[in-house]
Amino acid sequence: MTRRLPVDPIAEAKRQWLAHGWGDAADGMTVVTSVIRAHQLLMAEIDRALKPFDLSFSRFEMLRLLAFTREGRMPMASAIARLQVHPTSVTNTVERLARDGYVTREPHPTDGRAALLALTDAGRRRVDEATDALNAVFADLGLDDDDATALVRIIARFRKGAGDFADPAPVPDPL
């Protein structure tokens, strides 16, 4: 654990930005550095929770994604799209999970060029255990419910504006 600093370094950075005449960028710099620091803090907690299971968050996400499917399998291309990471990262994650016996690659039933990823029984057990440990982290982030809801809404608006996702098309009324 690191010792607490006597001053918030992000607030000090904003003060410096303003003092150097970069007022038009100071709020943006503060947002970016705050989000990055929050990411670092959250990832440290996640890493601590997953360490006993020898899983990184990316490996956990892949296992959890497969476990959420009806049959514990999905095409590799679907996993890449849902995880929103570079295909090489997913390939590396899958290789390590396969080496550990948590997933297998199966031929796609209709596309000879594609592969299906399948969760093994060992993979399902591992991700269920790891999920219990992560849920302990998720249940106590140090934010009250209103702050957590507001934060998610703000970040969702930012993500949507950046093109991360679109609102689903409206479902037509039944005839």
Image (cartoon, rainbow, N blue to C red):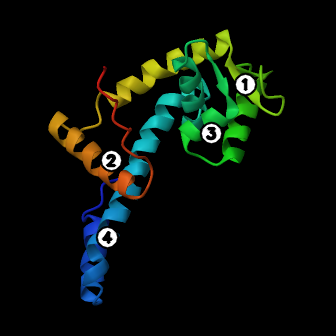
Q: Residue at x 55, y 13 (%)?
A: 70
Q: CA distance from mark 2 to mark 3?
A: 20 Å
**Label 3 is placed on what type of residue?**
Ile
Q: Indicate which disc residue 116 carries.
A: 1
- Residue that mark 4 sits on: 28
Q: Say which residue appears at 71% left-offset and 32% top-offset.
A: 94
Which residue is label 3 attached to? Answer: 80
Number of the front mark, 1 or 4: 1
Q: Which is nearer the eye, 13 or 71?
A: 71
Give the alpha-carbon distance from disc 2 to disc 1, as whole Å: 30 Å
Q: At label 2, which amino acid type do we have? A: Ala
- Left or right of 173 on screen, residue 135: right
Q: Residue at x 18, y 34 (%)?
A: 145
Q: Measured from the top left, where is residue 1 in percent x and y? A: 40, 45
Few, some or many residues within 10 Å of mark 4 (<14, 14–19, 20+):
few
Relative horizontal placement of residue 110, taking residue 81 as reference (left or right) = right
Q: Residues within 10 Å of mark 1 (few under 14, many from 20)?
A: some
Label 3 vs 4, first from the N-terminus: 4
Pointer 4 with pointer 2, Cβ within 8 A: no
Q: Amino acid at mark 4?
A: Gly
Mark 3 nearby-residue class (10 Å; few <14, some 14–19, many ≥20): some
Check disc 2 and report the residue beneath it.
156
Marks 2 and 1 in Cβ contact (< 8 Å)? no
How crowded pointer 2 is (Cα within 10 Å; few <14, some 14-19, many 20+) is rated as some
Q: Which mark is residue 69?
A: none
Regarding mark 4 in the picture, which secondary structure is present there?
Answer: helix
Task: Single out the mark in the foreground, 4 or 2.
Answer: 2
- Which label's residue is closer to the chain start, 4 or 2? 4
Check contact, mark 1 vs mark 3: CB within 8 A. Answer: no
Disc 2 + disc 3, Cβ < 8 Å:
no
Whether the residues at callouts 3 and 4 have beta carbons within 8 Å, the answer is: no
